[in-house]
Image: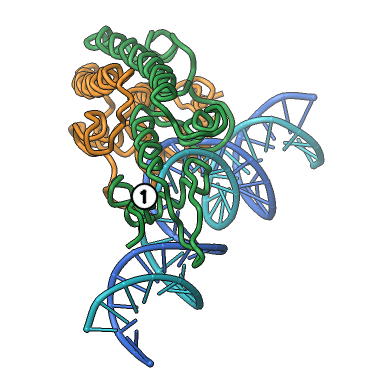
Chain colours: A orange, B green, C cyan, D blue
Amino acid sequence: MAAATELTVGQVAMRSGVAVSALHFYEARGLIRSHRTAGNQRRYGRDVLRRVAIIKVAQEVGISLAEIGTALRSLPEGRTPTREDWNLLSTAWRDELDQKIAQLKKLRDGLTDCIGCGCMSIDKCPLRNKGDRLSTRGPGARRLLIER
Amino acid sequence: MAAATELTVGQVAMRSGVAVSALHFYEARGLIRSHRTAGNQRRYGRDVLRRVAIIKVAQEVGISLAEIGTALRSLPEGRTPTREDWNLLSTAWRDELDQKIAQLKKLRDGLTDCIGCGCMSIDKCPLRNKGDRLSTRGPGARRLLIER
DNA sequence: TTACAAGCTCAACTTAACTTGAGGTCAAGC
DNA sequence: GCTTGACCTCAAGTTAAGTTGAGCTTGTAA
């Protein structure tokens, strides 16, 4: 057994709780990186664990992998994320979360107001006409809960 | 021009703001209904506008079409939704919304606590280990923001 | 040295919610 | 009577985030 510093995909999967296939996928998307052994197998530095942790947290916040990738790649020199970097990212993501919460609250309040009114008029219901339209932009599936 | 009571798909699309193809789609999913002219074209009663309005509001709340369909079909006798029905649905959906908001708040508070700590330890970070795991259940795409 | 687990690649499948396109019909004005 | 726009059906495409499987290679423990 070599120095305990290098991890195989299986080990990373185990320790991070994400599937091997997901790690392959993240790598293809440029979210994590590995080098290869002579036999073409992936080996990861320990920093990959922190990266994966960041990815998972960001996903729970509702950030897409594409955005996460952009954020990670925008770190100066593409270096391993430090405490400082994490501060920046988590602050930004917390702000996004705050916005989403605010949006949902607005919607809930509208819904609360509307209970009992039963109007649901296409033209007059405040729920339907107020606020930025989410839909109607380009093809493909819609973002399920909220657009930015 | 016949009595102004019957609407064509195009008219419903216009007045409701959803695409004709989406209306076809909703009909295939059993969310709305139509009858056909001699020439096999769809004609809708005005109640379709209220139904579509309900669908759109529910979607903004983050309810899936499948759940919306179930809710609509569970209305006694499949009748046109009344004020009463709308009350029931909107109350239930508001509660769901409340839960989602609460969940996001928990996440945000965790994120806030973690800012500055920079730990991101897979094993120790409270953000990573606390709370119900969302992922890891069955194949296919994950619900983007929140599982129920 | 021989199993057998763990890796590798690449293509295809999954879900949700629609959209797009092809190929053909219906209706209404000129 | 013909052209034009609105309709119709059905199949296939789109996005996100992975998973699943086939077919083949590595690595390691007995």
Residue A24 position, x and y percent, is: 47, 39
Q: Please tell me which residue is depicted at 28% across the width and 34% down the height of the picture.
A: A121
Residue A52 visible in rendering: no
Residue A144 visible in rendering: yes
Q: Please tell me which residue is depicted at 19% across the width and 32% down the height of the picture.
A: A131
Tell me if residue A38 comes above or below residue B89 in the rendering: below
Name the image quarter holding the N terminus of chain B.
bottom left
Tell me if residue A87 comes above or below residue B12 in the rendering: above
Q: Chain of mark 1?
A: B
Circle 1 residue: B5
The image quadrant of residue A106 is top left
Q: In the visual, does A1 lie left or right of B114? A: right
Give the amino acid type for the residue marked by disc 1 in the picture.
Answer: Thr
The image quadrant of residue A144 is top left
Depth check: A36 or B48 in front? B48
Residue A32 position, x and y percent, is: 37, 35
Residue B41 position, x and y percent, is: 46, 62
Tell me if residue A17 comes above or below residue A121 in the rendering: above
Q: Please tell me which residue is depicted at 37% across the width and 23% down the height of the picture.
A: A60
Residue A20 position, x and y percent, is: 53, 33
Q: Residue furthest front?
A: B3
